[in-house]
Image: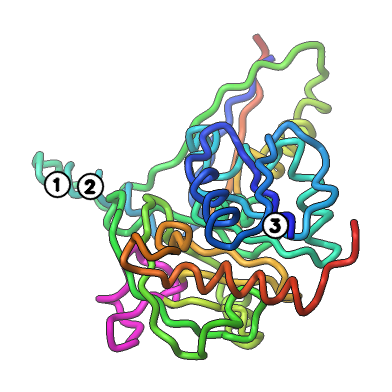
Amino acid sequence: MNIGIIVFPGSNCDRDCAHVVSEVMGQSAHLIWHQGRSVQGMDAIILPGGFSYGDYLRTGSIARFSPIMEAVIEFANQGGLVLGICNGFQILLEAGLLPGAMLRNTGLSFICEDTYVRVENADTPFTNKCEAGQIIKLPIAHAEGNYYTDPVTLSALQANAQIVFRYCDTEGNATILSNPNGSIDNIAGIRNAKGNVLGLMPHPERCAEVIFNNQNGYLIFESMLTSLIEHPPLPV
Amino acid sequence: MKAKIYITLKDGIHDPQGQAVQQSLHTLGFDSVQEVRMGKFLEVDLQDVEKESAEATIKSMCQKLLANMVIEDFRYEIVET
C-alpha cells in the first residue's frame, strides 16, 4: 500500500510516521511536501504531528490552506482514509473535515506524558484491530488539545458513535481526573460521519514497535492496513 | 485604508489564558478585576479599495482564516489612512 504523509513547514512527526509505515507496517511511505497539489496513487493519507507554521494564528489554521490540502479534502470526500495525529487532528478541524475546534489546555501547560484512552468504537477502519472498550496507553504532547464543540454537534458525535477514543484511567473510567487537557466529554479522538477520517491527539506512531516497550499505537496502523486490504480503495 | 480586527472567544467558551491573567491581576492587588478574556488584535493594511468592498473583504478574510467561527467572534473598524 502507498501511504502519503503530508509534510508542512513545522511538521516534526512526519518521519516517525514514515518509519512506522515502512519499517513496521512494511508498506511504502511517501513524504509529500505541502506545496504539492496531488495525492494521486495514495491509498491513505496521514497528517502528522508537529507545529505547522509555528502554530501561528491558531493551530492548523494556516496549514489548512496549504496547496496540498485541496487534494487531501477531495481524497477524503471520495472516501479515502485520512488519519490526523495531534497537529494533523487540529488541521482536520480547521479544514472542516472533522467538526469542532481546539482550545488551550485547561491547565495552560504543554503536556507530554502517557495517557490511557478507551476505544469507544472498534468498528472503524482505524480501530478494527482493537476491542470495544479496550484501554490502550498512548502518549500525548500538546498545548492545545482541549477539544470543544457546541452541544448539538456533541450530541450528534455521541449518537453516531463518532467519538472513537476517550481519555480514561487505567480502569477505563473517563473522569475529570483522567482528562489531561479539559476536552469536552473526555474526547481524545473522533471520526467523521462517513467514517473514513480520524483525528486524535495522542501519538500512536510513538509507541508502535517493540523497542518502545509499548506497541499499543500499532493497533491503529494495523487496523488501517487491514481495512485497506479488505476494502481496497478505488484508484484515484 | 487600514482595518483593525478584534478576534475574541465567543461567550461561554472557556478561556484558560484569560483566567490565568485574571488570577495574576488579583495577586497584584487589582481586586476590582471581575473577569479577563483574551483575544487577538490584527491590523491589516488594504490598498486601492473602496470602503464598502473593503468591509466585504475583511468579513470574508475573518470568516475564512482569521477567526474560527466555532469558538470565536470578530469585529472590525476600518480607518482611512
SS under mark 1: helix
Position in image of residue A12 (x %, y %): 48, 40
Q: Amino acid at mark 2?
A: Val
Q: Which residue is mark 3?
A: A96
Q: Residue at x 68, y 66 (%)?
A: A197
Position in image of residue A28 (x %, y %): 68, 52
Position in image of residue B20 (x %, y %): 24, 48
Q: CA distance from mark 3 to mark 1?
A: 39 Å
Q: Which residue is mark 2?
A: B33
Q: Of tags 3 and 1, which is closer to the observer? A: 3
| Circle on res. A124 | none
Q: CA distance from mark 2 to mark 3?
A: 37 Å
Q: Amino acid at mark 3?
A: Gly
Which quadrant would the C terminus of chain A be assigned to in this image?
Answer: bottom right
Q: Which residue is mark 1?
A: B26
| Span shown in magenta | A167-187
